[in-house]
Image (cartoon, helix red, strand yellow):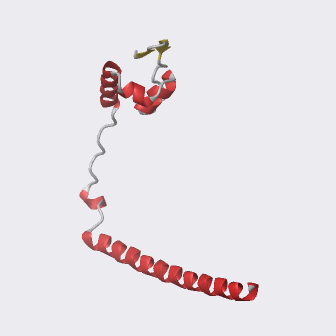
Amino acid sequence: MLEVHHEYGALGPAPRHTTGAAITFETVARAAGVSRSWLYNQPDLRAEIERLRARHRLPAARPVPDRQRASDASLLRRLDAATKRNRQLEAEIRELREALALALGERRTTDT
């Protein structure tokens, strides 16, 4: 198992990787009590972490079968709906900003 040694003394072996969490520089650094930058600057440790990461990578997702893929027409409808919703939200934001400006203007005139 990977052991991390620091210039101030051995930090001991990192805990076994049994949680199913991804092997990352962050998880190794946290387990060993060192910084990620320190790990990156240790060529042997960096190579070992990268090797373990490659070994534990999840297999690529299988492509979606043709019958389950969204059609171009369906995607265009969804895009049109999202664009319409964005325009509605932009108009609402514009109206709210105008209302806020009016309210602040009225407040300013009553405060003076």
- Residue drawn at x 46%, y 30% is 27
Question: Could you say which is closer to the camera, residue 43 or residue 65?
Answer: 43
Which quadrant of the figure contains the C terminus? bottom right
Question: Could you say which is closer to the camera, residue 25 or residue 53?
Answer: 25
- Residue drawn at x 40%, y 74% is 82
Taking the view exactly as shown, the residue that stands out farthest to the right is 111
- Residue drawn at x 47%, y 18% is 14
Left or right of 104? Residue 30 is left
Residue 54 spot, x, y in % from top left? 30, 30
Residue 20 spot, x, y in % from top left? 45, 31
- Compared with 44, 36 (above or below) is below
Question: Could you say which is closer to the camera, residue 104 or residue 30?
Answer: 104
Residue 70 spot, x, y in % from top left? 30, 65
The answer to whether residue 109 shows anywhere in this view is yes
- Compared with 68, 4 (above or below) is above
Residue 36 spot, x, y in % from top left? 43, 30
Dividing the picture into quadrants, the one containing residue 74 is bottom left
